[in-house]
Image: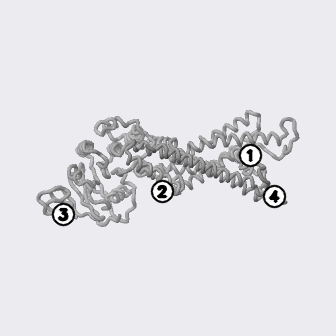
Amino acid sequence: MVLEDVSFSVREGEILGLIGPNGAGKTTLFECLAGLMTDNGGTLKFRGKELAPLRRKDALFYLPDSISPWEEQSVRWVLGFFARLYPTNNLKVNELLEPLRLNSVMKSSIKSLSKGERKRVLLALGLLTPHPLLMLDEPFDGLDLRQTRDVMGLLREHAGRGKTLLLSIHQLIDAGRVCDRLVLLSAGRVVAEGSIAELRSRANIPEGGVEEVFLALT
Amino acid sequence: MHSRNFLGLLGKEWRELQASRSFWLLLLIIGPLVGHSFITAVGLYSEMSGGGGGPAALPQGLTPLDGILVPTFGAYDLAATFLFPFVAIRMISAEKESGGLKLLLQLPGTLGTKITAKGLILIAGWTVSMLPGLLAIVLWKSYGGHLYAPETLNLLLGHLLRVTLSAGIAVAAAAIAESAASTPAPESERIDQLAGQFRAKAVDEVVETEREVGRARGVARVSQVIDYIFFVLYALLGLRFLLALLAANSSAGFVQFIVTVTNPFYEPFRGIVASPRTDGGHTLMMPLVIAIIVYVLLHLGINGLLRIIAHRKTAV
């Protein structure tokens, strides 16, 4: 996926949603931002200073979608591994078990988890990192309605503590519920950026949800 | 990078090594191979040295290095070439395929420290696999055998250097390749296809879907391991055939090793038909050809049986 003229900003403690159809370039953008994929140009500024690709992991952490890391290991060990690597984060593993409903799977291996359980373990890994900016690719994919609601609450709580969240979401309804602002990406370009109200105004739709706005702008 | 973080990475790599089937396969194969080579080497050495009061055939020319250590540790030549590269490849490919590599690259520490951690654990794994060989050395000493420490150490370091090189090439290949699988692509496709068929059937019939698929995958895994063992056997028998055809020097360490390792598999076919031989010693070992054909049939038979088991397991 080729990205061109993609430019946007995210504020501290904000939940910014990156939305767009499949193939819009959301994952490519995340991987470029995280320094995992080489880009031909472009810069990332963090608190006014440019961050070189190799230094980006000091400021941001990217949690890819559909991964199953270290799948022979138990959930307890994987979470403990992250907690030991990032002792500077005051958050303890135990604090995430209840909200993410992980108590029952702690002894299970990663490979034995269902899609939803794996997603919740990955979210716990992301939240255990102390980075000021956390990028989550499809954080609600595989979660049921109740779990989605709980995870949204948890993300909101962490944003309230100052963590900045950049979420890639293809479910527009979910994006509208959790994000403070949205960036609409289509065919590798930013189509629009702003809060729902701002996007509505731009699309000339006084009423309507994210879906209507998205359809009007793309 | 903090030493605590580096220790954490080492711990992770060690656990990943322990979870690697290739590593356990290496350990499973290397023990009997070294043991068999050692027992045969001691027997031959004793015979040649005139043990038991008999005439000494080569009392002056055969040192413990040539007579015991080289044949015994010859098993590690095989391991370094055929087995250990798969262990090394899994250290990279497993994380690439699961997506864990994307997380690993973002963890504290430079790329160099992460590669170092993997390299150190691979060396530790190789050291563990050396235990049967080291045990053979201890046994040899307990029999009253002589060893010259510098040349023994030289041999061990030579093996370490060799395995480092082959593991390095394997890791580099796995890192560059889009998908470095531990099995040839057609085999993986066949396994995936088989597992896919099982999956579809199980879903349709709503019968403990994932468990059934897992079982099918388990059988496919066993089939992979059996394939690998047979391919190694074909390679060894093929090498012995080639060495005989080229009239290779039978006192060379490598030739001795190949003969020693393949003897148990060749024995039932020895003398089954004549082996044409030229004056120069070039031999066409026809019994080996028959042995390979029989092992191919056995291989096909075992795989057929596994397929039947897999199908029966998923039937409702």
Q: Which mark is residue B277?
A: 4
Of all chains, the one bearing label 2 is: B
- Tell us which disc is closer to us: 4 or 3: 4
Of all chains, the one bearing label 3 is: A
Residue under label 3, please give it: A216
Task: Decide: few, some or many residues near mark 2? Use Cα within 10 Å; few <14, some 14-19, many ≥20.
Answer: some
Of all chains, the one bearing label 1 is: B
Give a yes or no on whether discs 4 and 3 share a subunit. no
Residue B140, picture quadrant: top right
Residue A125, picture quadrant: top left
- Tell us which disc is closer to us: 2 or 4: 4
Between the residue at mark 4 and the residue at mark 3, the CA separation in whole angstroms equals 85 Å
Residue under label 1, please give it: B267
Amino acid at dot 4: Arg
Task: Decide: few, some or many residues near mark 3? Use Cα within 10 Å; few <14, some 14-19, many ≥20.
Answer: some
Residue B250 percent across, percent down from the top left: 78, 52
Q: Earlier in the sequence, mark 4 or mark 1?
A: 1
User: Residue at 27% across / 49% down in the picture?
Assistant: A164
User: Residue at 41% across / 44% down in the picture?
Assistant: B210
Kind of element beneath mark 2: loop
- Residues A208 and B108: in front is A208
Amino acid at dot 2: Ser
